[in-house]
Image (cartoon, helix red, strand yellow):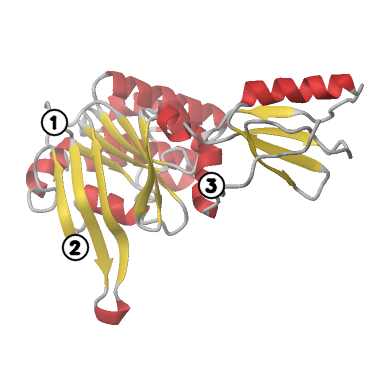
Amino acid sequence: MSGPVIAATGLRRTYGTGDAAFEAVRGIDLDVRPGEVFALLGTNGAGKTSTLDLLEGLAAPSAGELSVFGLDPLRDRKRVRPLCGIMLQSGGLPAELTVRETLEMWRGTCSDPTTADAVLERVNLADRADVRVRALSGGEQRRVDLACALIGQPRLLFLDEPTTGLDPESRRATWRLLADLKASGVTMVLTTHYLDEAEALADRIAIMHRGAIARLGTLREIVEGHPAEITVDDPAVPLPGLSGAWSASSDGAGRVTLRTHRLQEDLHRLLDWAAGRDLDLTGLSARHPSLESVFLSVADEAESAAEPIGAQS
């Protein structure tokens, strides 16, 4: 399709009525393009789950416009649902069924399924096919959840915390599988608490806060304009003035963090200043802005406009 797979304009979701009403989603706009991985991140209580319910066709919006494959995901559910795979945070799998029986049961609900054996091979569970679900580890159960989402060969895949409970090796294997799905043209909406996962997989990222989208764009677009950080053990003497620095703060444990928009220039000046005084800057580290630093600034509402550091060198 030429247009977006998901298009939302002015999307709202309100719980309750009158004085007891609570607006969990407050007029958000977003689109998910064909073949991309779109990460939807959120601070605590941001409205991420409520947004997902709307996108998945599990609830009706209180206001706004929403389409999935050009259709209403709730009203046209019979047409939209066969095109989608959904991996929930907790799949609620029948404990007494084997893995293969679970997949066969799920397969019977799909209009164009692949085989259970094929999808178990993809999620690296072929050797566990005849094991009862209750005997699986938490990470293995998550892989069964993913297999259920994949068995219908979806064009759009919703992944809600897909690697929770997985060991590092299994996480990387899942990342490779999702990269293969993306390469085959599958569109994905991903939610995760692992920010490195969003960085590794997502083409674009939205960060929600208090029911609204606080940041939206590629990783580079999101971190653009956010300060880098230089951290050093407190040298117990005044630091030099740094032209790009916004603020300096101490963590109370003898560490000082400088936030700057001119990382290379200010780091060079700091090192020159230390060399001129024969001073060893212990614990020195420098970090470009990251998704984590942006996410935390949104969570803490900490976009302060501190004065530049003005001490004389």
Label 1, residues with CA under 10 Å away: few <14, some 14-19, many ≥20: few
Q: Which residue is mark 2?
A: 62
Earlier in the chain: of badge 2 and badge 3, it is 2
The residue at 25%/19% (across/down) is 184
**What distance separates the C-alpha of mark 1 from that of mark 2?**
24 Å
Q: Tell me residue 105's x, y (percent).
A: 23, 43
Query: In what quadrant of the picture does the C terminus appear?
Result: top right
Q: Closest to the observer: 199 or 229?
A: 229
Residue contact between numbered discs 2 and 3, judged by CB atoms under 8 Å: no
**Residue at the (14%, 39%) spot, across then down:** 82
Residue drawn at x 30%, y 81% is 19
Which residue is more in the foreground, 159 or 127? 159
Circle 3: residue type: Ser
**Left or right, residue 82 beside residue 243:** left
x then y, percent, for residue 140: 46, 38
Res 3 label: 1
Residue at numbered disc 3:
297
Pick the front one: 119 or 198: 198
Q: Earlier in the sequence, mark 1 or mark 3?
A: 1
